[in-house]
Amino acid sequence: MKYNTLRSQLIIPEYGRNIQNMIEHLFTIEDKAKRTDNAYFIVNVMAQMHPHVKESADYLHKLWDHLHIISNYKLDIDGPFPKPEKEILTKKPAKIVYNSSNIRYGHYGRHIVNIIKKANEYEDGQEKDALIHSIANQMKKLYLSWNRDSVSDLTIAENLSELSGGHLTIPEESRLISTNEILAKNGTGSLSSLQKKKKFAPRRDNQNFQRKKSR
């Protein structure tokens, strides 16, 4: 009996030892036409082993690629697809470079910072005031998504001024969307209802104690 530890390593374990042995047997077939016919047969067996691969449009191409991969790219046959290049398949993807710059207020996100920079380029007027009002409302929504407690318009105004380098100020006549309205749209209820729930919500241990006591 031959142990698996003494056998060659499985290239693609999903296909098992028998498929790998069949592919290795192809190298013993000298006639290229017969070798190609046997390769087609093996691919059909591979497809039957994993019928779910047929859900993808290029499943046949994948199966033939797997055939060549298991053969260590050395198989000489006339397949329906070109032999994959080992260098391309084994090439490591390029490292993703993350933006390492810090954001002063992370809960607002980088998009808000970029929008504020763009708003600084606008000339003073109604269009700029409307943009500032929209930015401030969005900042308030983002703040309440991060911290569901109340936030004052003064805090938003101060953060906006700081992020814009003192160039953007909320017009005096502008009124930001109310906290209760934002929480209601987010499906979390109004601020007052949240405070009541926190204040009067019974503790689970008290409920369990009362149940035991009633028994």
Image (tube, rainbow, N blue to C red):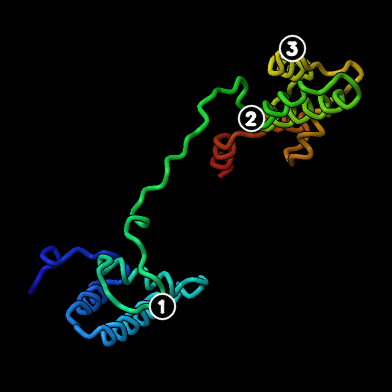
Quarter of the rendering occupied by the C terminus? top right
C-alpha separation, residue under disc 3 versus residue under disc 1: 66 Å
Mark 1 or mark 2: which comes first in sequence?
1
Q: Nearer the viewer, residue 198 or 4?
A: 4
Residues tagged 1 and 2 counted as in contact (Cβ below 8 A): no
Q: Nearer the viewer, residue 149 or 34?
A: 34
The residue tagged with tag 1: helix, strand or loop?
loop
Residue at image position (39%, 80%) is: 48
Q: Nearer the viewer, mark 3 or mark 1?
A: 1
Snapshot quadrant of residue 53 = bottom left
Dot 2: few (<14), some (14–19), or many (≥20) neighbours within 10 Å?
A: few
The residue tagged with tag 3: helix, strand or loop?
loop
Q: Nearer the viewer, residue 66 or 27?
A: 27
Residue 50 position, x and y percent, is 40, 74
Residue 28 position, x and y percent, is 17, 80
Left or right, 59 with respect to 195, comes to left
Residue at image position (57%, 37%) is: 204
Q: Vertically, is 151 above or below 86?
A: above
Left or right, 44 with respect to 165, comes to left
Residue located beneath label 1 in the image: 80
Q: Nearer the viewer, residue 147 or 160?
A: 160
Snapshot quadrant of residue 190 = top right
Residue located beneath label 3 in the image: 166
Residue located beneath label 2 in the image: 109
Residue at image position (84%, 20%) is: 123
Instruction: Tell me the amino acid under the disc marked 1.
Output: Pro
Instruction: Tell me the amino acid under the disc marked 3.
Output: Gly
C-alpha separation, residue under disc 1 versus residue under disc 2: 50 Å
Instruction: Tell me the amino acid under the disc marked 2.
Output: Gly
